[in-house]
Image (tube, rainbow, N blue to C red):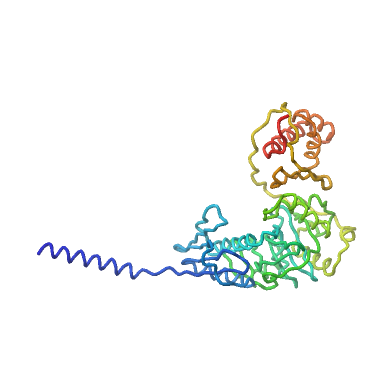
């Protein structure tokens, strides 16, 4: 009797557990795949994120999902989200719905680029006006995203605020259909036009970033020829204007901000150099987004543009913007200042203006040398030590303190040696 009662209790408990399992809600799964990509976006218990992605990418058509492709996964858990992707070294955790949508959108763009290895992708903002593209790039925090968002309030088509694919072989800019995502709160001096546009055209907002809607955004797949390349120079004050830009500096910016490295470094450099030779390259300095937008709309309303005419009679730029420095990369191991080195065999050097670009023997890495570093490279044609090179250059660069030149020469030798560009003599 006792044994029978225990058995009945056990079966009753087991039945209850089965009922609990059956009552558990199945996860909500939403799959999306965007045209030209090879990886679907899969949202698990992340309906809010899926809603953001669909709203933001309304201009990027969806296609049937690839069943066997590695997914870009977004998983929700108690109001926070994690993103796992073939393009991430490790998952991202604790994200807001907008942050998770951003991760999925960026990786969808990466999937598109992986499927089109002949395309370049520049870290630049761009908009189409009168049938050609204005491309603007520059160092971090020069205002690419906010300028793109401000231009979205004008009668132009915005192609990108930070990721602009360049097609092959024609070197046209291609729109992914991703609208600008300005940082919030908007920086001081953004102006009421941008503030009002963000208020009226926010598609997804988490208080830190805001995706705009698709108003005035070029749809996915639209292409246009490049009309001009601008180097952004944001200032603390002063008017908007243009100044001459050195092509070597522009090439360095585009090389550093090319987001695709699938071919030889020398071929990449040659392609970007060819692009810069075919279009004007100008520096845009500005402090007010409204002034910059008015200047751009006025000067690029018709093509071709006279680059020399644009920079003539321009006002002087205002006070340089003070940007807190980011921590620099760790310096490699030091070398003995008296040790002699010479160029490694198989290294190819290309001079553009006052700057030199070096390609390693495998043609996978490109290193940019400024005037001082270029002079060091010239000396390395014969065996020489960092101390000897520094002493020679200290005489040539008399306006620079001798200790600075000597220190820079030793650091450069260490960089060159670490990158396999010089060897012990």
Q: Is residue 260 left or right of residue 296?
A: left
Query: Which residue is at the far top?
Result: 338
Q: Nearer the viewer, residue 298 or 8?
A: 8
Q: How many marks?
A: 0
Query: Residue 340: horizontal and vertical position, in percent?
Result: 73, 28
| Figure check: 412 above or below 8 | above
Can residue 181 be seen here? The reply is yes
Query: Residue 155: horizontal and vertical position, in percent?
Result: 75, 73
Query: Residue 281: horizontal and vertical position, in percent?
Result: 82, 57
Query: Which residue is at the far left?
Result: 1
Query: Dividing the image into 4 quarters, which one contains the C terminus?
Result: top right
Query: Dividing the image into 4 quarters, which one contains the N terminus?
Result: bottom left
Residue 407 figure quarter: top right
| Figure check: 108 above or below 391 | below
Residue 183 figure quarter: bottom right
Residue 78 figure quarter: bottom left
Q: Nearer the viewer, residue 353 or 189?
A: 353
Q: Residue at x 82, y 66 (%)?
A: 300
Can residue 196 be seen here? The reply is no
Q: Residue at x 72, y 61 (%)?
A: 166
Query: Residue 278: horizontal and vertical position, in percent?
Result: 83, 59
Q: Residue at x 17, y 64 (%)?
A: 7
């Amino acid at each position: 009797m006792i044994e029978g009662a225990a058995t009945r209790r056990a079966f009753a408990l087991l039945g209850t557990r089965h009922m609990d399992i059956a009552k558990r809600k199945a996860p909500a799964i939403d799959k999306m795949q965007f045209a030209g990509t090879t990886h679907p976006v899969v949202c698990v218990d992340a309906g809010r994120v899926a809603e953001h992605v669909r709203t933001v990418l309304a201009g990027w058509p969806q296609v049937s999902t690839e069943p066997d492709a590695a997914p870009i996964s977004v998983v929700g858990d108690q109001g926070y989200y994690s993103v796992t992707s073939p393009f991430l070294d490790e998952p991202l955790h604790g994200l807001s719905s907008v942050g998770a949508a951003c991760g999925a959108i960026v990786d969808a763009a990466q999937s598109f680029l992986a499927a089109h290895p002949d395309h370049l992708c520049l870290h630049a903002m761009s908009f189409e006006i009168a049938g050609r593209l204005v491309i603007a790039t520059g160092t971090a925090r020069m205002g690419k995203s906010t300028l793109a968002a401000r231009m979205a309030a004008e009668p132009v088509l915005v192609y990108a605020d930070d990721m602009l694919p360049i097609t092959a072989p024609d070197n046209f800019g291609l729109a992914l259909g991703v609208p600008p995502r300005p940082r919030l709160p908007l920086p001081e001096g953004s102006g009421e036009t941008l503030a009002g546009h963000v208020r009226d055209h926010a598609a997804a907002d988490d208080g830190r970033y805001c995706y705009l809607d698709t108003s005035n955004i070029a749809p996915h797949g639209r292409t246009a020829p490049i009309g001009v390349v601008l180097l952004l120079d944001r200032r603390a004050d002063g008017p908007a204007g243009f100044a001459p830009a050195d092509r070597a500096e522009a090439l360095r910016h585009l090389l550093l901000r090319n987001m695709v490295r699938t071919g030889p470094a020398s071929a990449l450099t040659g392609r970007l150099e060819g692009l810069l030779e075919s279009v004007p390259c100008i520096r845009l300095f500005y402090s007010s987004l409204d002034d910059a937008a008015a200047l751009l709309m006025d000067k690029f309303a018709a093509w071709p543009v006279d680059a020399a005419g644009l920079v003539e009679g321009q006002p002087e730029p205002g006070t340089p913007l003070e940007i807190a420095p980011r921590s620099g990369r760790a310096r490699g191991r030091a070398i003995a200042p008296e040790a002699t080195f010479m160029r490694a065999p198989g290294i190819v050097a290309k001079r553009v203006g006052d700057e030199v670009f070096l390609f390693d023997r495998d043609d996978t890495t490109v290193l940019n040398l400024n005037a001082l570093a270029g002079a060091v490279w010239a000396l390395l044609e014969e065996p020489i030590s960092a101390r000897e090179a520094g002493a020679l250059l200290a005489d040539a660069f008399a306006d620079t303190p001798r200790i600075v030149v000597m220190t820079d020469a030793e650091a450069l030798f260490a960089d060159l040696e670490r990158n396999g560009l010089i060897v012990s003599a």
